[in-house]
Structures are given as C-alpha cells and as structure tokens.
C-alpha cells in the first residue's frame, strides 16, 4: 500500500464500526425520547446511555488503533482514552447524585476534566514530526481567533448561569467546560491546518469531534430541557466523529516531502468565518438591547485585534506570493524565450490561450492575432489530425507517436510555412480543472525543409545530366514492380564514347553525355523514367509491354546514331575531329516475381548481346538469355540447401610419384548433381558460391568430408597426401587456419598429410594478412601448393618468399609437350625451377603415353591425369589404391 493511504478496513473492523455507529444512533434516539417525555428516571438513564456510547466508542477506537503501526497508532491509542474517561465520568454520575446537572461539580467531573488534556495530546501527536511541522504564527493566530470566538459565545450564553453559581468547584465546572471547549476548537483548527494531506481527513473528523465537544460543554453548563436535549445529541455526534476520525487514519506515515511553503488557506477561512460570525452575533445581541459585560467587550476587542493581525499577515503573505509568482513567471518566460521554439498553450477546445517566444518570426503572426484562434484552423487540412492524436496520447499518459512532426501552417499573408511540432505536454494536473489543455512547442523549419528537399533531390539526381540517378531509378523500378501494370526496362550504352573521352577530353565527353540525356528525355514518352546509371550507361523505365518498349528502343537507336563533333567550351565548333557515336539497347520485360536486380541483370545480358551483334542495335532478353538468368537464379537459390543437406559429393583423383611407382596423393574435387539441371560444372557453382558468400561453408564441408575419407586409408597403412582446393574468399575471410585445424582434429588426420592448393594469381596478389595465415598453416604442418602455375603471372622473388611446397603446372603446359620442342623446354625450365627452390612439381592433365614419356624424360617427379587414374568416389578409393599398376608409368594402360 502506498505510504499515507488510509488503511483498508477488514470485514470485522468495518462491521464493528458500523455496529457502534448504529448503537450511537439508537442511544441518541433513546436519550432524546427520555428528555422530550420528561421520564422520571431520565436523570439516571441518560447518563447510562451516555456511558454505554462512550464505552463502545473507546473499545472500537482502541481496536482500530491497534491495527496501526508505530507512531501512526499512538495518536489514536491516546484518543481512545478520551471516550473511556468520559464513560467513567458518566458511570460515576449514574451512581452519584449529580445526575445530568453539569453545573454542579462532583467526583464525576474529574475523569471528564482529565479527558481534555488527553484530547489535546492526541491532536498534538497527529501533527507531523518536529522537523516537518509547519505550525507557524499564522496557524497559531487562526487557532487563537477560533478559541477566543468560541469563548466569547460561551460567555454570552452563560451570562445568566454564572451569577447563580455559588462558587468553588461548581463555578469552576460551569465556566471551565466552555473554556475547554473553546480551547479544543482552536487546537482542532491548528491540527487541520498543520497536518499533511494524508492525515487531513482524519484531522477534519477530529475537529468535528472537538466542535461537538464544545457544544456538549456549553449546553451542559446552560441547563434546562432544551440545553440538556442538545447536550445529549451533541455527545453522540462527538463520539461518532471520533469513530470516523480513527477510521480515516492512514495506515503508514506519509513519505516526507520537501518543504512546501504554502498559505494556510483552510485555517484563515475558518478563523475569519468564526470571527465574523461571533462579531455579527454580538452586534445582533447588542442591537436587541442586551447589555455586554466588560469581559465580553474585552473578548470582542481581542477578537478584532487578532482578526486584524491575521488579515494583515494574510496581506503580507499575498504580496510575497505575488512577488514570487511574478519572479517565477519572469524566469519561465526568460527560459521559454531563450529557445528558438514558440510555446503555445491550447485550451480544451483547441484555442490558443497563451504564447511565448518569437511568435512573429517563427509563425508569421503577431501574438495578439493568434490569441483565441483554433490552431487546427491554421493548419493544412492534411495535418489537422495531428493535434487530436497528440492530445489523446498526452491525456492517456503515453508518448505521442510521430513527434517531432512537420506540419504546414498558414501565415497572416496567406502563405505557408513548414513548422515542426517538437514536443507536447499536458496543461496542469489531473483534477486541477485544466487537464484537457495542451502545450505544444513549435519551430519554423521552412529553411531546413527547403535544404532537406534539395539534399534529397541531389541524392537522387545525377549531378552532370540532371537525370534521376541509379538510386532513384531502382526505387521507381521497385514501384512499377509492386503494381499490376506492365513494364519494361531499357539499358542504353553509348558506342564510341571512349574515343571522345580519350581524344577530345573529359569535358567533351561530359558535354556529349548531357546532349544524349536531352535526346533520350525528348524521345521518351510522358510517364517514362529516364536515368543515368553511371559512365555512358543510361536506363529507361517504360510503363508498357514488350512491343511498345522495343519500338521505343529502336527510336532511341536511330536518334543516337549520328556523327558528333565536340564543341569548344564557348559553344563554337572549331573544326575538330568528328566521332561516330551510336547506342546499343538491351530490353528486358518486368515479369511477375522478378526482383529489380534480376530485371537489370537480364537487361544487361541483352545489352551485351547487342554489343556482340555489332553494336548500334536492339536486343531483347529472349528465351536463351532468360534461361541463363533463370538457371543462375535457381542454382543460387538451391546451393545453400545442397551444402547443408548433402546435395554435394566428393571425388578423388590420384597423384602418382614417378620414383615411388605408386599413388602418393589424392586431390579432392567437389561435384554437384542438381535434380533438374543434372551435373553442374564446378567452375559454375563455385563461382556462384564466391559471389553469394557461400564459399566458406562450402569449403568447410569439403575439408571435413575429405579428411574423414582419408583417415581410414591412413589407418590401413597407406602413405598418402590429400590436396584440397582453396578459394581466395576463404583465405580473405581470415578463418581458414581455424577451419583446417577443426577438420583435422575431428578426423584425426595429421596436419602434414594435408596440402592446400591455391591458384597462382591468388598467391601472387596475397597481402600481408593472407601471408600470415599461410605462415600459420605451414607452422601447423600443412603444405601449400601453387595450383595452375604458368596460367597467370609470378614474381620469382615473391615465389621464393611464399610458404609453397608444391608447384602444379597447368594442363596447358602439358598439352603439346610431346610434339612441340618449345613446350617441352618450358616444362623443363619449370621442373628445374622447382628443384632449385626445393619444391615438388606436379604435372596436371597427363592423358596420353606421349605426354607421359616426355615428362619422364624431363624428370618431372609427380603426375596427375586421366591416363594415370580418373576421379572416383571415396568408397572406391581402396580399390583404386589396390588396383594401381606401376606398369602404367612404362606405357601399360590403367583400368582406372
């Protein structure tokens, strides 16, 4: 439960209080009946009823206080003693001889007199702790005014009683009870004013209890039938108010708050009301001819002085509060005006009630002109719902979506400004009467909007030609693809543009591009999008079918086919060279399900076909081109599943040692049998894997499967090496060494058994990072082979530094070695280079006995090719190794 909240009544406690309140009502009816009927036993029965009511109140107050912890319950434990003392006094009066005559003193008065300081102590305990009490001079004056006022009233009422009191205890009782009642009223008022909000409800009931006690005291002192009737009824009202006060007590002490210096409004209102009522009563009494005693006159004068002093202090407080309010408002206005936003306060009807800031410069209106206007009436119709949405969100306590938001606001002159709504808040607090208002912060962002639109234009516009650029064109292409209308894409490439740039210069080339952009814009139809993609490549998005798009492409080819003489920067022709410039166009239809990137790729294939056909022509993405594009897209989509789901396989081709006369190694070759396209060439799907970022998982799979296949062969005693081709993408990824180590560890293969085959062009262009990875692999014990040696270019100095153990000659070297002396000499030089650098040399592509004989004469140590053995799957490797015939090296054909 939050601190300071009234304690929740349990069922038994609530039922007990309800029963006591019902009992008090019943006893009040009984005493009224006894008094009205002048029952002969009223002198003893009425005190009995009063005693029963007081005792029941004491019991329920004590039980309720016992449920309150610590200091919170102390107040009500003390207050529970008051009805207990009152009950004791009435019991004594019941058995004594005083009966109902409160004007006579006796033993019954002692407990009742003791109850007065106990009640005052309970009120003091209800006040906040000493460090947080706000009982100042104002509150004390309010209490004094009420005390004096009640005392004066009591004095007036008792004027006829006091002279007849013989003195002693009887006089003290007759005069003391009304004075005590007046004191209780003053203390109760001080308590109501000084307590915190959590306890004010209980304090208010306590004030009602003390006020009823004052009525009890005065009416009891008066005597007479009416006064006794009033005395009894006020007694039960006092007890009922005490029960309600205990019920309203908070369960826990409230959380201390920072000191809030506020004016005690409740106290001053009650004090002035009491003072005015007393003075008005005295005036009426005096006007009726009733003489006022000196005591009453002094009391009235004292009341006037106290009231005047309190009024003066109220004026001082009001002046101080006004100065503070003005100072705070000045601070607030300075704070608001220091920003560049205009603060606008709207009432519940959306009308502008208050503005601050540079209103004229930001909104284009004078401040008085906007007061009373509805803000939505000044907004563009498309933006008017923003205010309602923001108001709803702020009222619900949530964050307004879409802020900051830019709206269009009409100025005094009828123009429009872009205004940003940067923040919103609710006016006042719930229950304050202004909670439906709204505070908005507005800022003129017209210049920023213009700049932003210009930046967007530049971001989507080619700076040279003014046409849409690639980004804008791809967005337009996506929009057409999202619709249902037909569309075609034309890619236009200039023929002969390079000669203009090389001979006439880049300025001439730029002017030519601008001319071509104008010609394309003129030739295109309304609604078509013409864009420059880059360089001398343009694109046209045609919102029509293939026939109309092809006809437009033919027109563009005709428009662009002319001689071009570059102009000088001043616009005059100086008789320079004439260039034949034309255009080639590729056409691709936008098909359902085809992405913009795929449409551009198909149009690019058609453009390449136009270039290959002699340029200056139009080619469409026909069936053959579409099949190629569709095949590539299908393979790219199916390759991930093939890698993950076992759609790939490995075959192994033997490498034979000439001196060893046996198979000394195996090269792992990956294969893919597609369910629709059949066997896919490795160059095709490995290229796809490199383009689509799949080569690393592909080669992880190859390393794992290949080393797993080699492990049982090594366990059987075969001395073999395993060669695995490695892509540059895997080497660039920086995880090759980790993947190799994992594959070797899982299969139990020694690192020196693995040779990583990397193409010559990759190794020659390897940076420092890749060289470090290769050094790591060599330190692990793995070998590195330079694959396809001779197909690219090599720096011998760099070759000597690289961690290469094996040179594998490209099959082009071996193809004519048996009938071309120059080829044989070249192979011999490679073999000699390998010996000099300490590298083994492997000749690939050995397919004829003549090639084999020539390589043996040269002294090549290792051979690989169909003549020595074709690639076989892993399950046939034992048969391959067992069935190898060394005689093949002497010209005997192999069966594998």
Image (spheres, rainbow, N blue to C red):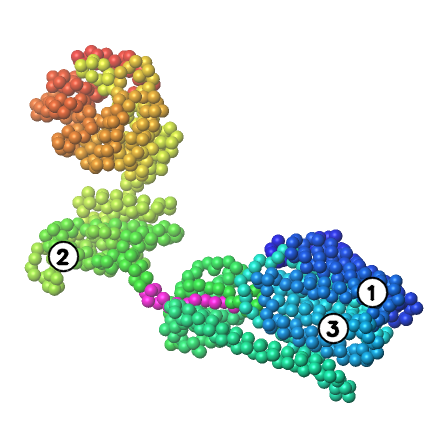
Q: Secondary structure at mark 3?
A: helix
> Which residue is outermost to the left?
575
Magenta-tinted stretch: 436-450
Position of residue 187 measured from the top left corner of the image (x, y, whole percent)? 68, 69
Callout 2: 10 Å neighbours few (<14), some, many (20+)? some
Question: Mark on residue 43?
Answer: none
Depicted 373 relative to depicted 872: above or below:
below
Foreground: disc 2 or disc 3: 3
Judge left or right: residue 79 versus residue 825: right
Residue 796 part of the magenta-drawn span: no
Residue bearing the label numbered 2: 508
Looking at the image, which residue is at 14% across and 25% down?
837
**Horizontal placement of 733 versus 33: left or right?**
left
Q: Position of residue 345 (x, y in %)?
A: 48, 70
Whether the magenta-drawn stretch holds residue 439 is answered as yes
Q: Residue 233's image quarter?
A: bottom right
Q: Which residue is mark 1?
A: 108
Name the residue that disc number 3 marks. Answer: 179
Q: Secondary structure at mark 2?
A: helix
Q: Residue at x 18, y 49 (%)?
A: 616
């Amino acid at each position: 439960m939050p601190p300071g909240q009234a304690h929740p009544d349990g069922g038994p406690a609530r039922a007990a209080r309800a029963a006591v309140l019902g009992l008090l009502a019943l006893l009040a009816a009984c005493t009224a009946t006894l008094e009205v009927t002048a029952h002969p036993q009223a002198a003893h029965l009425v005190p009995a009823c009063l005693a029963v009511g007081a005792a029941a109140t004491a019991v329920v107050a004590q039980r309720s206080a016992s449920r309150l912890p610590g200091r919170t319950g102390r107040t009500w434990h003390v207050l529970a003693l008051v009805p207990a003392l009152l009950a004791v006094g009435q019991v004594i009066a019941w058995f004594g001889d005083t009966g109902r005559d409160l004007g006579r003193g006796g033993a019954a008065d002692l407990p009742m007199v003791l109850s007065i300081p106990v009640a005052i102590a309970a009120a003091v305990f209800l006040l906040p702790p000493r460090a947080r009490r706000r009982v100042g001079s104002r509150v004390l004056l309010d209490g004094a005014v009420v005390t004096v006022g009640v005392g004066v009233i009591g004095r007036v009422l008792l004027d006829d009683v006091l002279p007849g009191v013989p003195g002693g205890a009887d006089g003290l009782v007759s005069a003391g009870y009304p004075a005590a009642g007046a004191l209780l009223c003053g203390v109760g008022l001080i308590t109501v004013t000084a307590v915190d909000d959590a306890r004010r409800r209980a304090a208010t009931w306590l004030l009602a209890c003390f006020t009823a006690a004052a009525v009890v005291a005065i009416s009891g002192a008066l005597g007479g039938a009416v006064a006794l009737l009033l005395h009894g009824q006020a007694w039960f009202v006092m007890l009922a108010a005490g029960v309600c006060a205990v019920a309203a007590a908070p369960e826990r002490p409230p959380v201390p708050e920072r000191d809030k210096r506020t004016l005690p409004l409740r106290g001053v209102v009650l004090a002035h009301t009491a003072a005015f009522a007393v003075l008005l009563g005295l005036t009426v009494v005096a006007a009726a001819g009733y003489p006022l005693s000196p005591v009453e006159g002094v009391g009235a004068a004292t009341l006037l002085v106290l009231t005047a002093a309190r009024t003066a202090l109220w004026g001082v407080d009001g002046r101080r509060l006004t100065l503070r309010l003005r100072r705070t408002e000045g601070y607030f206005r300075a704070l608001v005006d220091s920003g560049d936003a205009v603060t606008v306060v709207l009432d519940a009807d959306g009308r502008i009630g208050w503005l601050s800031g540079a209103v004229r410069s930001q909104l284009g209106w004078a401040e008085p002109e906007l007061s009373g206007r509805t803000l939505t009436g000044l907004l563009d119709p498309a933006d008017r719902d923003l205010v309602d949405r923001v108001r709803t969100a702020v009222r619900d306590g949530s964050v307004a979506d879409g802020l900051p938001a830019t709206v269009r606001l009409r100025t005094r002159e009828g123009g429009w400004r872009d205004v940003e709504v940067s923040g919103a808040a609710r006016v006042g607090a719930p229950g304050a009467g202004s909670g439906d208002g709204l505070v908005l912060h507005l800022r003129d962002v017209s210049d920023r909007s213009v700049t932003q639109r210009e930046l967007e234009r530049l971001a989507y516009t080619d700076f040279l030609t003014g046409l849409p650029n690639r980004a804008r064109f791809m967005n337009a292409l996506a929009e057409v693809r999202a619709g249902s209308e037909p569309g075609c894409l034309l890619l236009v490439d200039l023929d002969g543009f390079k000669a203009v740039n090389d001979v006439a210069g880049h300025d001439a080339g730029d002017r030519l591009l601008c001319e071509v952009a104008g010609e394309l814009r003129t030739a295109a139809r309304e609604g078509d999008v013409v864009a420059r993609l880059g360089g001398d490549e343009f694109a046209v998005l045609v919102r029509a079918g293939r026939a109309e798009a092809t006809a437009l492409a033919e027109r563009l080819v005709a428009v662009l086919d002319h001689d071009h003489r570059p102009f000088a920067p001043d616009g005059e022709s100086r008789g320079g060279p004439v260039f034949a410039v034309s255009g080639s166009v590729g056409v691709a239809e936008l098909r359902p399900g085809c992405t913009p990137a795929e449409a551009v790729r198909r149009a690019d294939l058609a453009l390449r076909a136009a270039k290959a056909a002699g340029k200056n022509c139009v080619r469409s993405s026909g069936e053959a081109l579409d099949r190629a594009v569709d095949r590539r897209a299908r393979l790219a989509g199916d390759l991930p599943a093939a890698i993950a789901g076992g759609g790939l396989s490995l075959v192994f081709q033997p490498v034979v040692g000439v001196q060893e006369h046996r198979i000394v190694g195996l090269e792992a070759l990956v294969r893919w049998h597609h369910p629709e396209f059949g066997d896919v060439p490795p160059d095709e799907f490995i290229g796809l894997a490199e383009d689509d970022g799949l080569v690393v998982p592909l080669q992880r799979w190859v390393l794992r499967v290949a080393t797993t296949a080699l492990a049982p062969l090594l366990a059987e005693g075969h001395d073999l090496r395993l060669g695995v081709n490695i892509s540059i993408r895997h080497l660039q990824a920086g995880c090759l060494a980790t993947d190799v180590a994992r594959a070797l560890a899982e299969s139990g293969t020694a690192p020196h058994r693995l040779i990583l085959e990397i193409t010559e062009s990759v190794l020659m262009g390897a940076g420092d990072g890749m060289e470090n990875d290769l050094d790591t692999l060599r330190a692990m014990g793995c070998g590195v082979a330079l694959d396809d040696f001779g197909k690219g270019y090599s720096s011998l100095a760099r070759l000597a530094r690289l961690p290469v153990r094996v040179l594998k000659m490209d099959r082009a070297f071996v193809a004519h070695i048996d009938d071309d002396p120059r080829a044989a000499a070249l192979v011999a030089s490679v073999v000699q280079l390998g010996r000099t650098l300490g590298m083994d040399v492997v000749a690939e592509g050995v397919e004829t006995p003549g090639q084999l004989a020539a390589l043996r004469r040269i002294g090549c140590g290792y051979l690989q090719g169909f003549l020595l053995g074709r690639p076989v799957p892993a399950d046939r490797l034992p048969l391959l190794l067992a069935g190898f015939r060394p005689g093949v090296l002497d010209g005997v054909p192999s069966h594998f």
